Amino acid sequence: MNLKSIHSGARGLGWIALWALALLACNNNPYPATEGDEKVLYSSFREAPRSLDPAVAYDTGAHAITGSVYDTLLEYHYLKRPYELIPGLATNLPSQRPGDPGYTVYRFDLRPGMMYENDPAFALDEPGRTTREIVAADVAFELCRLADPAVNSPVVEPFSNIQGFQDFGQALTQRREDPAFADLPVQDQYASLGGISGVRSVGDHGLEVAVRSDYPQIQYWFAMPFTSPVPWEAVAFYDGQEGRPRFADHPVASGPYRLDQYDRQSRMVLEANPNWYGAMHPEWAAPGAVYPSEGAPGDLEAGLLAPEWVGQSLPFIDRVEFRREKESIPYFNKFLQGYYDAAGVIKESFDQVIDEGGLSEEMAEMGIRLEKGVEPTIFYIGFNLDDETVGRPGGGPARKLRQAMSLVVDSQEYTRIFTNGRGIPAQSPLPPGLFGYDDGYENPYRQVDLERARELMVEAGYPEGIDPATGKPLTLSFDTYDTSAQGMLQYRFFTDAWRQLGINVKVEATNYNQFQEKVRNGAYQIFMWGWVADYPDPENFLFLLWSDLARSKSGGPNTANFMDDRFDALYLSMKSRPNGPERQKEIREMRQILEVERPWIELFHREDYALFQGWLENVKPFGMSFPMTKYRDLDPAARASHREDWNQPVVWPIWVGLALVIVLIVPGVVTFMRERQ
Amino acid sequence: MESHLISNGIVLVMLFGTAATIWAVRRSRLWSSAFVSLWHRRRLALLVTAVYVGVALLDSVAWVGGDSLGGDTVSLHEARSVIDRVFGGSQEKSYSAPLATTEFYGGRGLRYPGGHWLGTDMIGRDVFYLTLKGARVALLIGGLTSLIAIPLALLFGISAGYFGGRIDDVVFFLMTTLASMPGLLLLIALIMVMGKSTLAVCVALAVTGWVGFCRVSRGETLKLRELEFVSAARALGVSEFQILTRHILPNLMHLVIITFVLMFSGLVLSEAILSWLGIGVDGSWGQMIDQARNELSRDPIVWWNIAASGAALFGLILAVNFVGDALRDVLDPRTVKDEK
């Protein structure tokens, strides 16, 4: 008996030793070991995109895929700021000529000889075929899909500026009431209606689009996946029946990468597309297929224009792996272990990573880089200018009141407390990186100046905030639908500032429906709002103050109900003018009007903090949600060695644990033995 | 009428009420011996409760005038309580740790270095001051809700138990219906309908909270109405109303007091849960906990907000529960008999 128990004890110890040895041999690398020296970019996603259909996908997660997979006629220059368009699939930026009255015709010319990625869908038209040439009719087809109510694209509104776009959608709906028509394949439906009247393909490679002359911003939409060429075969073939995936899950496209694997639950893989025009025709040295040779000031010093990349064919990275990470903390830990190449700064460990706006020492030692990019956004407090007290009916005194209120709101302090300092104080509606943004401009009413503000209160007829009508402090309401405790703290920050002037601003937090109701009835005084641009044009910000879009007039997004004839005239003229000194002058004048009128208290432009591993190269943050993966490069050898350094197994806890177990067991065993004897 | 005058009035009424109660207790041998025995059993818990009540009273006496609080000129025209005047006005910009001399993040100097016993919150408010202010809110919720719920429960309970028949059926039907609805959902729905205000929260808590005591008082009344002295009164031709007020109600009073104390702590806790769901009362400890919920995941951690409000809440509930338990022992005739 005794002997047996000793024997089994020894065997147990042997197992533990084996187990410890096995632990020493294995590691925590989540990827196959063979991938070590390949140029693979590791990224992640939280939820799989709802749709990869380029006509529908409109969120950052989906753009991470569609932006790499679908190529566009135009694209953004990788380095230059303000943002600049360069030709992509097109040979040049579009030429313009007047069309029907009120319309301008944009002419795009596609490069001949570009092919789609290989896909069985192309056998639909001609058995055995796996690809075909990209033609202008494919872009026209995609524009028809945008207009098609059945596709339900979220961007119908801007594209309605195309001549005949809305008519096409309506005609389609009407004709579909006839079941014989509705049963036709969509490409035949579009063809029998003759397509959109303002979109015409000229030969195989020419495309003419007639757009309202006051909407030159349409060009930016040709740099987004919404307008990339889509082969009708793919839409017809991938219908989700007989085991075929839906087109929304199976892109067939022309971009630098193709979707190789798509497992919505765990993994998405992009690999370099051998049919991409940049790969097939390096001799073209097309602007969208080689690394740029010039950039914004500072890019040379930042190493973004190193000779090893300039003029080289893209893409540098062969494969992009997206792994699903549902939680942010494990994701960030894997980033710190070197298993992801880029990460955002998560709130939970913000102070561990960022130290006074820069990278903490610990992170800097790891070779991690912090890139800050100002997003094309504006957050602001708006006044309802239809209001008796704060708005237009109040005349000059109300303007002084707005100016005074603007002078005590400290954006710097606000971002420091509520957004971890992510955001730069706004002086005007225009964020940096946009044409018309002036770095040296300081809005005299966006500085913190309590003394001046108190003087203005006296001039406005509210000395020390006392409303002469009631003899009590002036009472205003701040309307919001954010009832969370965090939200209340934010509003408290503003109301505390205004209390310094003797103004008692009450926060009226209601639910969203009640808030909407208040906005509809014009029963609001002060509100807080934000705007994220669709494309980097000053028009996309200044239209928020155009009187035609006033909430009280047309239900538009001008919630401040700002209406100023001079501003409107400048806006309409600026809108259709190309970037240049004239436009700059007009924007400056508009800024001047806003500066004095104060329909908004501009708070801040949001700043995106992104962390990149040292081995990821050519990283320049891009404010808009398009992946610039094809310009990036990485050093797999450096990555492999860092991963090894950062993932040394820590074995002492095992030995300590083992020792503890023994210490706990031995007395028990000893007692047991003694008692048995 | 200005809200602070109402508040002052309530304090005055409460003080008179307390004085009257003390006088009544001293006159009645039963009640005064009960209180003496309570004092002997739970001295500390009674003192802690008294401190909370004292703070709440000091926060309820308010008047206009005096200096402005830290440049806030609106406050000159607002009624401020004793607590506001003594502890308010030491506003900082953002977080600072208890007794710190610099800000928690960034390390900038404070306006009142070392002056914040429990630190400051996200927008620089003194946590000790906020915690003190919470006492009034907690007592208001507990007190006001009990004042609505207990008379309601007594009315229904006594009439169901004493008259029986149809009335009993109706009351019992009401009770079962309410009891079979998920309490929290009913609360949320009621507050959504009535809007978010202190009174709305109290009414909603009362509507969902009266059922338990109603059941108890009904059962007790059923028992009492069969006792000899009630039968005797009825035989002598005493009116129903007189029987109810002279014989039934006084014999339920010990239950009322016990229920009031125990219900009180439950209500304060319920409010904390409602605050966490975003529909609580402004300035309550529950709301402080709600505001602080992201602070625990910060690194380095901001703990003083949740610790202060949590401890204040815990202290009050614990003390009140101790008092309630002791009260039950003291007032229950069975336990009293056992001791003798």
Image (spheres, coloured by chain):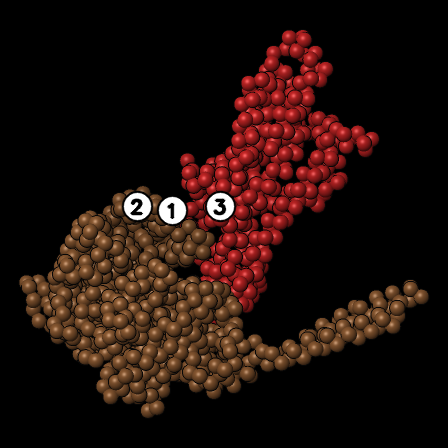
Q: Is residue A5 visible?
A: yes
- In primary-sequence order, the first of circles 1 and 2 is 1
The answer to which of A385 and A20 lies nearer the viewer is A20
Is label 2 in a helix, a strand or a loop?
A: helix
Q: Amino acid at mark 1?
A: Thr
**Circle 1 Cα neighbour tier, 10 Å, few/some/many (<14 / 14–19 / ≥20):** some
Looking at the picture, do discs 1 and 3 lie on one chain? no
Q: Which chain is red?
A: B
Q: Amino acid at mark 3?
A: Gly
Q: Position of residue B88 (x, y in %)?
A: 50, 53
Is label 1 in a helix, a strand or a loop?
A: loop
What residue is disc 1 on? A510
Cα–Cα span, label 2 and label 3:
23 Å
**Circle 3 Cα neighbour tier, 10 Å, few/some/many (<14 / 14–19 / ≥20):** many
A419, above or below A491, in the image: below
**Residue A564 falls in image quadrant:** bottom left
The answer to which of B89 and B289 lies nearer the viewer is B289
Tell me whether circle 1 and circle 2 mark residues in contact (CB < 8 Å): yes
